[in-house]
Image: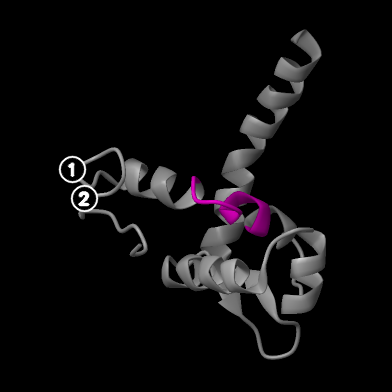
Amino acid sequence: MATPKPGKPVRGSTTGRPVMALLDLLGRRWALRVMWELREPLTFRALQERCGGISPTVLNHRLAELREAGIVELTDGTGYALTEEGGLLVQDLLPLDRWAERWAKRS
């Protein structure tokens, strides 16, 4: 499956609206977990360990998609890290994390 891109049809949307492309990308198995763990730079092996249970093949595929989307980058010395835009995206997701915590307390 190709990396979702704004302006192109994606799962759930033939219009390719940017938000739909983003939700398609983030909704892929392990994508959010990989981003969450990359709040600090990690080597491939360390990232795989932090994501417990992810196969190397799936991790490679997810990293390739997130790199193509400009969310993750391969650094010279530390391995993988969020790009500036990736860091902003994680910051924008923090209110969802707070909402989920409140939701968990109500459930």
In the rendered view, tell whether residue 51 sits above or below residue 92.
below
Residue 43 in view (yes/no): no
How packed mark 1 is, by other alpha carbons closer than 10 Å (few <14, some 14-19, many 20 or more), is few
Residue in front for this viewpoint, 38 or 28: 28
Q: Disc 1 vs disc 2: Cβ atoms closer than 8 Å?
A: yes
Over which residues does the magenta segment extend? 27-34
Q: To which quarter of the image does residue 6 belong?
A: bottom left
Q: Residue furthest bottom?
A: 76
Residue 33 falls within the magenta-colored stretch: yes
* Residue under the point 69% across and 61% down: 54
- Residue under numbered circle 1: 14
In the rendered view, tell whether residue 75 sits above or below residue 95.
below
How far, Cα to Cα, is label 1 from label 2? 4 Å
Residue 94 in view (yes/no): yes
Question: What label does residue 100 carry, if any?
Answer: none
Q: What amino acid does circle 1 point to?
A: Thr
Q: Secondary structure at mark 2?
A: loop
Q: To which quarter of the image does residue 50 belong?
A: bottom right
Q: Secondary structure at mark 1?
A: loop
Could you tell whether 85 is left or right of 101 in the image?
left
For the N terminus, the quadrant is: bottom left
How packed mark 2 is, by other alpha carbons closer than 10 Å (few <14, some 14-19, many 20 or more), is some
- Residue under numbered circle 2: 9
* Residue under the point 77% across and 65% down: 40
* Residue under the point 63% across and 46% down: 91
- Tell which circle, 1 or 2, labels the residue nearer the N-terminal end: 2
Could you tell whether 88 is left or right of 13 in the image?
right
Q: Residue furthest top?
A: 106
Q: What amino acid does circle 2 point to?
A: Pro
